[in-house]
Image (cartoon, helix red, strand yellow):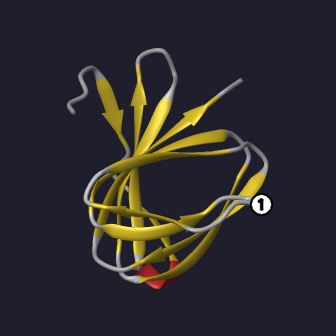
Amino acid sequence: MSFTNVEIAKKANIYFGGNVTSRKITFADGSYKTLGIMLPGNYEFSTDLKEEMVISAGKLRFQLPNENWQTIDGEGVFYVPANSKFKLEVETVTDYICSYIKE
């Protein structure tokens, strides 16, 4: 996957004591994504917008609201509903792309 005509934030977003980091990329139309890395650990995130989480490398388990745990080993995608929380159990260094979807 590659992106063209984007602006990249110089400053990283840093969460959980540096175990999760990302950088925001903004497209010409104003939409944006974050590209990041998660180190092994357990995390809980909340979101305002619907999110598409593309895992491009790594192994993790995720739990969406009112659903069972699911596993991604290598590559995969999951969607997080707007205005919700989700849990992650990251087993190996994981590379991700998060898209924010306005509905």
Pick the residue in front: 57 or 70: 70
Label 1 Cα neighbours within 10 Å, binned few <14 / some 14-19 / many ≥20: few
The x and y percentages for residue 98 are: 46, 45
Name of the residue lying farthest toward the top: 29
Residue at image coords 45%, 39%: 33
**SS state under label 1:** loop
Relative side of 45 to 38, left or right: right
The x and y percentages for residue 30 are: 51, 22
> To which quarter of the image does residue 44 belong?
bottom right
User: Does the image show residue 54?
Assistant: no
Pick the residue in front: 79 or 19: 79
Pick the residue in front: 102 or 70: 70
The x and y percentages for residue 70 are: 52, 63
Residue at image coords 48%, 84%: 17
Relative side of 55 to 43, left or right: left
The x and y percentages for residue 72 are: 38, 61
With respect to residue 40, does 27 lie above or below?
Answer: above
Residue at image coords 36%, 80%: 91
What residue type is disc 1 on? Asn
With respect to residue 46, does 32 lie above or below?
Answer: above
User: Disc 1 marks which residue?
Assistant: 66
Residue at image coords 48%, 33%: 32
Counting labels gives: 1
Quarter of the picture holding the C terminus: top right
With respect to residue 34, does 39 lie above or below?
Answer: below
Quarter of the picture holding the N terminus: top left
